[in-house]
Amino acid sequence: MLKIAITDDHNLFRESLILLINHMENIEVIVEASNGIELLEKLENVSVDLLLLDLRMPEMDGFETAHKVKE
């Protein structure tokens, strides 16, 4: 099972993408967040295989979030 995290500040886009991905075999979205700060908090308790990350978000943009996840 491929575990995915999605981070995007647009709720409708994020929810639509989650529905699409969760209908695929052996793939599941296990983390969703609306910004980088929220994502980092959630990743403290769970690990994922793939991160889909919006680059332009409030509070912490995708570039900074990716850097912090990599740390």
Image (tube, grey):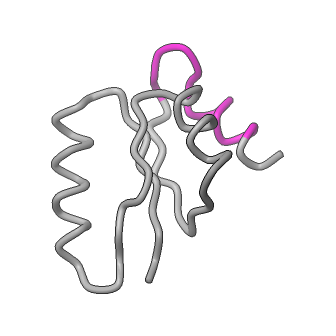
Q: How many marks?
A: 0
Up-down: is 59 above or below 70? above
| Numbered range of the magenta stretch | 56-68
Q: On the rendered structure, is 56 left or right of 27?
A: right
| Residue projecting furthest to the front | 45
Residue 29 is drawn in which quadrant? bottom left
Quadrant into which the C terminus falls: top right
Q: Nearer the viewer, residue 39 or 10?
A: 39
Residue 59: give x, y in percent of width and height: 54, 14
Residue 56: give x, y in percent of width and height: 46, 25
Find out whether residue 63 is within the magenta segment: yes
Q: Nearer the viewer, residue 19 or 41?
A: 41
Q: On the rendered structure, is 36 left or right of 67?
A: left
Q: On the rendered structure, is 26 left or right of 57?
A: left
| Residue drawn at x 57%, y 69% as measured from the top left | 49
| Residue drawn at x 71%, y 45% as measured from the top left | 69
Up-down: is 41 above or below 61? below
| Residue projecting furthest to the top | 59
Residue 9: give x, y in percent of width and height: 35, 27
Q: Nearer the viewer, residue 53 or 29?
A: 29
| Residue projecting furthest to the right | 71
Find out whether residue 7 is within the magenta segment: no
Q: On the rendered structure, is 13 left or right of 41?
A: left
Quadrant into which the N terminus falls: bottom left
| Residue drawn at x 21%, y 40% as measured from the top left | 13
| Residue drawn at x 39%, y 44% as measured from the top left | 32
